[in-house]
Image (cartoon, helix red, strand yellow):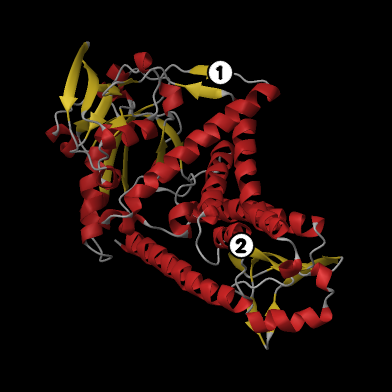
Amino acid sequence: MEVFLIKALQLILSISILVVLHEGGHFFFAKVFGIRVHRFSLFFDFWKGGKKKALKLGRWGNTDFVIGWLPFGGYVDIAGMVDESSDADAVAKEEANIPARELFKNKPAWQRLLVMVGGVLVNFLVALFIYAMLLWVNGEQRIPLKGITHGMSFNTEAKKLGFQDGDLITGVDKKTYTYLDHVAMLRDLGDARTVHVLRNGKNVDINIDGQFDLLKALKQQPPFVTLTLPSVVDSVLAESPAKAAGLQKGDTIIAMNGREVSTWNEIDNLLYPIQDQIAAAEGKPVDAKLLQTTLVVKHASQDKTLALAGAADTLRFSLNAEGKMGVTKHNVFVDYPTETIHYSFIESIPAGISHGLSVLKGYVSDLRYLFSADGVKSVGSFGAIGSLFPSAWNWTAFWNLTAFISLMLAFMNFLPIPMLDGGYIFITLAEMITRRRLSDKWIERVNTVGFYFVLGLMALGIFNDVVRFIF
């Protein structure tokens, strides 16, 4: 429950920040051009007795600032604009009470375009700014491949293609890696014909020619490829089985259920079969013996040889209902030598822009997988997004994910989907090119189609989240 709350709070805070800034972009340009804004709402509210019910924070000019009850999303209610929450008839009625110069519909096309682009623009700039500030504060940590001494671990599917535990992927086709970038590496494997690996000090080529499926690989347990990490405990979650048994931060697990281990990959391989049996039970109780676990751990001050001889602690406990111990692994930056690039404030700006554009390019590239059977199953809603946040609060991870979500929102809102910002942008651009304007009634019909399309996507995402949670 604690982990769920931490993830949920991070998600709500991140979405809240981005919604305020996104809607603030629309609000800013609306005020610049003298357009009346009835309401600025963080989160969505509901209708009761013909009126919207929300917590009113205050009023500035003609605008009410409120907080709704559903903690996802938000909106600005712009006078004279036909959107998903108002129809053409309602907009026509309000015209009688508002000066024509303050209506959105009466403004030149270029002004209406900027009002709609405002949210997307702010999300995009905010993401680049966050990335730049992260680089300025933390620098950029990189792990040279030459410093990875334990190589990588591969699952059964990877081994069928010719990979072996201990291999280190050094490049694909004509591309050579100098530093570790797991995400880019997986993307490259999806298009690669030949993978170059370092095996026992020798360069070996593995021909995979179209046999790697990224979506399937991302769902595989154990993962297709992971960096081999020593079995050092980074942190132990409060109220977890391992915490109660006495496992501590910095402990090294040297044996599990009678088998000597030295890496997290070996531990995961022992846990995955247990987790598979729990999943197969579909919520029904499993045999208590299945969850019983025995660990031999070495504290930081102990020698492994002495520990195996009996000087170590032997911990006995039961795994939780998901078949997990409640611990987090050592960070890869702790286990391998790193290079840190430090940026001044000025230097961080172009570096942040470059990094943000690279992330956006990767995200757009990954969208092609959406148009497949496995891609449809991967569509998620807020549950899927929330799961990306770490189990323990980490501000660097929080801001990094917030920047990514901001880029994602910017891109999705730029797509020409009716009801979303991109739909209005497309309609306005078409008007500027053709010199012909759609009537409010037509915009209302188009928005209705977009509303049900977006609603369908949300329903699919929620359904997939529920299926993933249950099964």
Q: Residue sitting at 57 percent across and 45 percent down?
A: 402
Q: Amino acid at mark 1?
A: Ile
How dense is the environment of label 1, judged by Cα within 10 Å: few (below 14), some, or many (20 and up)?
A: few
Specify the quadrant of the image occupied by residue 297. Answer: top left
Circles 2 and 1, Cβ within 8 Å, touching? The answer is: no
Q: Position of residue 258 (x, y in %)?
A: 20, 35
Q: How many marks?
A: 2
Q: Is residue 328 left or right of residue 123?
A: left
Which residue was labeled with disc 1?
341
Q: Is residue 242 at least partly visible in the picture? A: no
Asked if 170 appears above or below 286 in the picture, the reply is above
Question: Along the line of sight, which residue is nearer the eye, 40 or 97?
Answer: 97
Q: Quadrant of the C terminus?
A: bottom left
Q: Is residue 184 at least partly visible in the picture? A: yes
Q: Residue sitting at 61 percent across and 37 percent down?
A: 128
State the SS at label 2. helix
Q: Is residue 464 left or right of residue 426?
A: left
Q: Position of residue 433 (x, y in %)?
A: 59, 57
- Mark 2 or mark 1, which is nearer to you? 2
Going by the picture, which residue comes out furthest to the front? 435
Question: Along the line of sight, which residue is nearer the eye, 373 or 261?
Answer: 373
Q: Position of residue 22 (x, y in %)?
A: 65, 54
Question: Along the line of sight, which residue is nearer the eye, 262 or 465?
Answer: 465
Going by the picture, which residue comes out furthest to the bottom? 49
Which residue was labeled with disc 2?
431
Specify the quadrant of the image occupied by residue 336. Answer: top left
